[in-house]
Image (cartoon, rainbow, N blue to C red):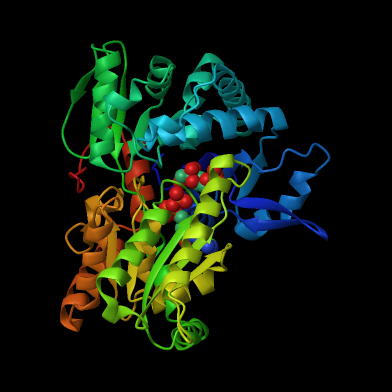
Amino acid sequence: MAFQQQRLVVVSNRLPAALKKTDDGWEVKAGAGGLVTALAPVLKNRGGVWIGWSGSSDPNLDVDSLLADFSSKAGYDLYTVPLTPEEVDGYYFGFSNEIIWPLFHDLQSRCRFHPRYWRMYLDVNFKFAEMVARKTNSDDYIWIQDYHLMHQAFFLKSMGVKRRTGFFLHIPFPTPDIFMKLPWRWKVIQALTEFDLVGFQTMQDRRNFSACLRRLMPEARVQGRGAVVTMDLGNRQFRLGAFPISIDYNQFSEMAERPEVEQQTFSIKEALRHRKIILGVDRLDYTKGIPERIRSFQTLLRQFPELKGNVNFVQIAVPSREEVDEYKELRTEIEQLVGRVNGEFSFPGWVPVHYHYRSFPHDELVAYYSAADIALVTPLKDGMNLVAKEYCACNTSGDGVLVLSEFAGAAAQLQKDAYLVNPYDMEGIAKALHRCLHWDREERRSHMTHLRDQVRKNNIYWWVDSFLQAGISKTLVDFPEVDT
Ligand code: ADP
Ligand code: F6P
């Protein structure tokens, strides 16, 4: 069966719909984060099934009927895996957010390697695999998303369920020095080898994975060249590839050109009195480098006082993992920093930092992207970072500048035309901002045209097709090297 016709079953920790408690009961909202932004248009476009957790562990909640309307409007089926509060605590907050998330982002000192988390991770993975087995058939393509569910192929096989499986890791894969600290390193690597295809964001992530695999399974041999290769383990083979994730370019770009969004863009510029706008947009997460970014802006104002009153930094942060102490502390740290910078520089008629801590409707976010002169995207480490790509797609004037962390996966593809910075180097970022604020129009346009072309060409549909082709086709042909 050709990969375009095969029924696609996406399995991720979260569904694309999130349940939120309000004073009037439960509300169904679109989920936040890069995974949902990328995959929701894909399933809407081709139909299929999405299996995941609803985000609530309230046993009295009738999740299926709450999601029925969302599912019929979206045009694909949703199946929820119910999780108890204990499971959410051990598997999601514990193993996923306190072990794999910090470790894979090179922040090993933040890890808490509790054996209880590991056991709960395995139990929940088994539960997900049972649901996959129940809701799918052998003709389906099962596409597992992200680090929460690395044991899906392992459990499906151990249940004797034959399915074609692919796994895509949305976050970075670390070097052996870091990965080897994981107490369950062998079991995790071994579980990943059970998929038919394992996909990464960049060639560097793929190389890191191969290096870890060879360290733990010396018999492993790579066959082939290019973005997708075969890994030979002697008794069996599986494929490995680099597939940089992307966005629905047209959706963003067309939205930016709608008259009502153009009006919002104008209103934002007017409210900020047509000063230069530097924009940050992130989930509030310690990997995103938000405090370092605010300090860089503070450095900019200290080192180039002529900019006072002429530039604004707008930071939009969507609440994320609010139950976790480190995220609460980060929020406090950011709020204090914003207060400090504004306290240091404000004068009547000008407040330098505008900070928003909430989820924005799609059109308002697009209007902010369009209004910004510079997008300042400086994660300490990031799998891809879709905000960088969204900014380019929305910059229909072609006048904007993307200042991008060299440690974001997106830097591999966008390095020629983004201004790359080290997110830890506050003086370096201040200098880069100063320089970009003074670029002439021609220079800005030339870089932004190339950036937009790159994101348009390598959009989310290209990503899906290249992954599924590598996952389903019998032979590996036409997989050119991707940017590293
Ligand atoms: P991650 O996957 O770590 O969340 P990405 O940059 O890849 O990081 O994706 C973040 C997604 O969240 C983007 O699609 C972005 O538009 C969205 N987002 C970020 N901040 C907000 C916000 N305040 N309101 C709505 N969406 C947001
Ligand atoms: O993109 C990485 C990721 O962890 C996704 O898997 C997830 O959907 C997103 O960030 C948001 O995180 P969470 O689901 O923990 O709120």
Closer to us: 96 or 224:
96
The residue furthest front is 344
Q: Do we see residue 161 in this rendering?
A: no
- In this view, 172 is above or below 213: below
Residue at 51% over, 49% down: 330
Where does residue 124 sit, x and y in percent of width and height?
A: 61, 26
Quadrant assignment for the C terminus: top left
Question: Where is residue 28, by image quadrant?
Answer: bottom right
Where does residue 334 sit, x and y in percent of width and height?
A: 49, 57
Where does residue 480 sit, x and y in percent of width and height?
A: 18, 45
- Image mark count: 0
- In this view, 182 is above or below 35: above
59 sits left or right of 272 in the view: right
Quadrant assignment for the N terminus: top left
Question: Where is residue 472, by image quadrant?
Answer: top left
Closer to us: 382 or 67:
382
